[in-house]
Every structure is written in C-alpha cells, then in structure tokens.
Amino acid sequence: MKKNEIYTVDIIDDTNLGYGIAKIDAMVVFIPAVLVGEKVEIAITKVQKKYAYARVLKIIKKSPARIEPSCSVAGRCGGCQLQHLSYAAQLDFKYKHLKALMKGQNVLFPLGAKEPLYYRNKAQFPVQIKNGKVVMGFYRSHSNDIVPCSSCQIQSHEINALYQFFQEHLTVELAEGLRHLFIRYFDKTKEAQIVFIGQQKNAWDSLIKECVRTFPSIKSIVFNTNKRNDNVILGEHYEVLYGKDSIYADCLSNTIELHFKSFFQVNSQQMEVLYKEAIKAAELDASMTVVDMYAGTGTIGLSVAKYVKEVLGVEIVEEAVENAKKNCRLNDITNCTYLCQDASLFAHDLMMQKKAIDVAFVDPPRKGMNEQGLQDLMTINPKRIVYVSCNPRTLYRDLQWMEKAGYKCQYIQPVDMFCQTTGVECVAKIEKMR
C-alpha cells in the first residue's frame, strides 16, 4: 500500500473519534467523515506499519443515518466530527462508544440537547496574517493551518455576528502580533466579552468604539499578553480596554460573574441539564455538608446550596475563587465558603478538623484527577461522590482507582454537551461501600 493509491472499501466499524474503519488485506484504514455500512472510494493519505489513513473521494453507498452538513467547511475544519450524522444517530454513536469503554459500568443513554446547533457561548478564533491578508477561522484537524469560514454552525448567533464584524474590520495593521480572538456571549444575560490575545497591543481605539456602538451586548474588552511560542492560549498579564474583566452569566437562576480566565461550560442549556443530574445523583438533604472540588466560579456549589446545610469549595485559580465569593454575595447565598488552596492542603485541613463530609462534587479538567487528587478525595472520605467529567477515558481510569479504595459507581449518565462533535460530558454517581 502506498500514498495516493485509490481503493473501494466497505466501512465495517468506527472509532470513538469519528473515524470509519475499513480493511484492505491485513491493513486497517481510518477514514474521516464516513459511516458504518457505507461503501466508499478512498485515496490513501498516510501509511504506517499496521494501519493507514485515507480521505474520501466518493460515497458509493450511503448510510440511512447520513445527512448533508449545514456547514460550508464541514470535513475541513477540525471543530466538528459528526455533522454528517443525524442527531439521533450521534447520540447512538456516543452511547455505543461509552458502553465499549466503560466495561462493567452501568452506562445510561445520553441526554440529548433541544438545540444541537448554535449552542456555544465561547469561541477562540486563531488569527494569522498570510500573503498580506488577515486570516481567521478554525484550525484544520491536527494542524495549525486555519480554515477560513464566514460563520460557525455551533457558535451562538451573537458570537457569529461579532466574528463577522472583526472579519470586516480587522486590518493587517490592527492584526499585527494578534494570535487569537476570544469571544464569550450569554443569551440569558445578553452580555458579551471580547479578548484580544497576542504579543502586542495595537491602535484599537476606533475599532473598539465602533464595535461597542454596533453591539450593545459588549460589556468587557480585554487585551491579554501572550508572547509564548506554544499552544497555551492565555497569557498571565492583561489590560482592560473597555468595561471590566468579567461579565455575567446565569446558571439555574443564579447570577454568575465570570472572569475571562475562569472556566464555564460552553453549552449553557446542557449545563443546566448536567447540574440537575448531578444534584439528583447526590441525593441531598438539609443536614448535609458537601465539598465542591475544582469549584471554578462556584456554579455547582451555588446550584446545590439551597438543598444542604453547608458547601465547602476549593479552587486553585485565584480569579475564579474571587468570582465564586462574589457570586455568593450576588445571590444572597450564605452557606458557601470558597478557598483558593491546593486540594491536598484543603483535604488535610478537613481531616484535622474531623469534618464529616456527606457528598463530594468533583469536576476536574480533561486530564482527570491525578493520584494525589484521588488520595486527597479519600482523605476527605465522603459517603458519596458525584464525578462530573468531560473525558470518559480519565473518568474510567479514576473510577477503577476509587473502586480499589472501597467505592462503587452506581451509574454513569452522559449529557450531550458538545453536539456535532465526538465529545460528551458524564455524571457518575459513586457510593462508599465499606
């Protein structure tokens, strides 16, 4: 088998990343944007010892689950992997792969979204200057090449409108040294935030004035300095150019102040579904003391506060903790305490105080909980753990560790937070067995 050779193949299976699988003799071939049961003509793009990659030239026999993507750059942009799959079939796809991964676990069917398009409240558009022109869009999969696009089918309409404004008004001079344009917008509060991320601040005064005049939703414009030559998007230092460094969002009727560095779920509607599932899994009552680890701006803790006696939250990002404290005041919540502290020290302090913890909510980043974090959790010794995860692989790994420590996962409830992509969020209910 050689690069550029052409074959006709049947798609016999798929991967959790959305690649179709075909076999040519003993060679496994991975092909994007094809579906199980399809017959396709392909061209080989890369050959390894035991497997190869290919691109589709022609679909000879279509799957009944195939639809025409509404996005003009679907298949070229790396943002969505499943736009060619009907939404009902996307949920089936995610359920199939979660069941295969979570061997021995009770995986429930994913909770789908009412609006599987135009749902995202945050976008990060890479910016480059090529051949004397400003290029904006999204990265091609596994590449730093930008695929230009006029709009994005999974970003909110307001974010698309803001993006189009900058496409029209961002000249080469204004884009010099700019690396990313970060945009947040929340439908419920009607507030937007713009963050210019780059090596230097340019003469943006007129641009900002026109942007604010055109979009009354804008409450914050920030310049974030990032001179690093790596994949880290946000730098340490920033300057507020208009308004302040935070905007307001809403979560389960709580007002949430959100610093631009603070984490917030990208799908506001499905976030509320997710947190309702977390509350259900926790089986809360008014006598309980609960812990909110990886607390962020306090969205989970604030959501459960009215059901329990006390919430103790810990978060390592200082700006997020300040937001969490202010969010308690904004919502007249008096039974939440948030600390900017290492989780190990937090867990040790609780142990020394002999503080009885009924439920621990954990919502770690994609890498999951490292061994120290898991040991910290065992030190807290909660009766029940509600684990919110955006990475099923690290969730499965951490569940295995917890089961060795005397806990048992009762069920895993997936929530389709990232429609049109292969990503999925999960809530795991975990009980102490001994």
Image (cartoon, helix red, strand yellow):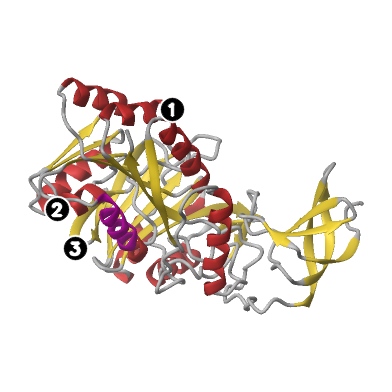
Could you tell me residue 203's position as x and y percent?
Answer: 40, 51
Quarter of the image where one finds residue 355: top left
Magenta segment boundaries in residue numbering:
271-282
Q: Secondary structure at mark 1?
A: helix
What residue do we see at 63% from left, 56% from top?
140
Name the mark nearer the viewer: 3 or 2. Answer: 2
Residue 109 belongs to the span the image colors magenta? no
Q: Nearer the viewer, residue 341 or 312?
A: 312
Task: Please tell me which residue is depicted at 57% across the width and 75% down the height of the picture.
Answer: 86
Per the rendering, the mark at residue 307 is 2
Q: Quadrant of residue 378?
A: top left
Q: Is residue 376 above or below residue 253?
A: above
Q: Secondary structure at mark 3?
A: loop
Q: Alpha-carbon neighbours of circle 1 within 10 Å: few (<14), some, or many (≥20)?
A: few
Whether residue 135 is visible, yes or no, is: no
Mark 3: few, some, or many residues within 10 Å (few <14, many ≥20)? few
Counting residues from the N terminus, which is met first, the one under dot 3 or under dot 1?
Answer: 3
Element class at badge 2: helix
Residue, disc 1: 371
